[in-house]
Image (cartoon, rainbow, N blue to C red):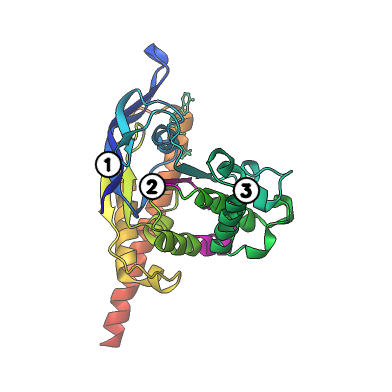
Amino acid sequence: MPTMLEVTGLNHRYGSGDGAHVAVKDLSFSVDAGQLACIVGPSGCGKSTLLRCIAGLIPPTDGSVSLHGDAVNGVPDDLAVVFQDYSRSLFPWLTVARNVEFPLRWRKLGKQERAERAQEALDAVGLSGVGRKFPWQLSGGMQQRVSIARALASKPALLIMDEPFASVDAQTRFELEDLLRRVQREQRTTILLVTHDIDESVYLGDRVLVLSKSPATIVADLPVDLPADRDQIATRESAKFVALRGEVARLLQTVPAKQAAPEQQADEDVATADAAEWTATEEAATENAGSAKETSH
Ligand SMILES: Nc1ncnc2c1ncn2[C@@H]1O[C@H](COP(=O)(O)OP(=O)(O)OP(=O)(O)O)[C@@H](O)[C@H]1O
């Protein structure tokens, strides 16, 4: 598969002098066309900064980003972003169909084609009949589907997602994860998705990039060797899934420490506690599996 995204020697520093904060350090990776790469890292490590640099929203202090071989300087036309907060990303005064069509206004497309593209995107996310409603008439999960439809309607070369399912309930989250994997495979969309959720990164990803504590750098790039067809119950119970999520948790638990501001250290402690909890769960699961095997003998 050709390379869609290439990040080379990326650095980003906020401010200068004594008050400077290095958020991203010497970060390099690439994503192949059609791949879904998940990024997981401790809270405050620099994930959003990395995404902003990749999306061309802020220029990196050093290093480069290229999309299908073209250097990114400013937001590329063929890039779409889905944020966590769907309620602030949709226009409440526009219908769902108009929201989905909105970014297409800057494309050289006729009115009819814009409407067709919007309908196709709504069909793809299972919202065929709601084009005439307003976002506030929909549930949170449906609103996030509209955001995804809007991103897909522009047929982006790269879809960037920043914690897209963090604001919905667990059941809706599962549905949206399955929807995303289905749409990604059907449309061969290249996706870079940031999540705090270790399980989600393994369930969704073709690979998982694990970041260090701040400043963000890559500590591991793990291929997810799970079948392409995933199931919320069977996949999460499989030995491969449990092993991978344990590996990610361990990596997050042992990422190198650094001098952190007290409030940032508190956030990092929460992320590390989460990772420790997963490792403990995994050990318990492994022990249970072991005793189950022993019992069956
Ligand atoms: N505009 C800014 N000016 C100065 N410092 C900033 C700015 N934006 C972010 N930072 C700092 O850069 C570091 C990384 O922030 P960033 O938001 O990229 O992390 P994150 O991993 O996305 O955080 P979270 O997991 O909480 O979403 C943090 O210490 C943050 O305080």
The magenta segment: 156-176
For the view shown, which residue lies furthest in the top direction?
Answer: 17
Contact between labelled residues 1 and 2, with CB atoms less than 8 Å apart: no
* C-alpha separation, residue under disc 2 versus residue under disc 1: 14 Å
Q: Residue at x 63, y 53 (%)?
A: 143
Q: Residue at x 59, y 54 (%)?
A: 118
SS label for mark 3: helix
Which comes before the other along the chain, label 2 or label 3? 2
Which comes before the other along the chain, label 2 or label 1? 1
Question: With 256 as the anchor, is 191 left or right in this view?
Answer: right
Q: Amino acid at mark 3?
A: Lys
Which comes before the other along the chain, label 3 or label 1? 1
- Residue behind mark 2: 40
* C-alpha separation, residue under disc 2 versus residue under disc 3: 40 Å
The answer, for residue 9, to whether it is visible in the render is yes
- Residue behind mark 3: 111
- Residue behind mark 1: 29
Other-residue count near label 2 (Cα within 10 Å), few / some / many at <14 / 14–19 / ≥20: many
For the view shown, which residue lies furthest in the bottom direction?
Answer: 297
Q: Can you tell which of label 2 and label 3 is closer to the viewer?
A: 3
SS label for mark 2: strand
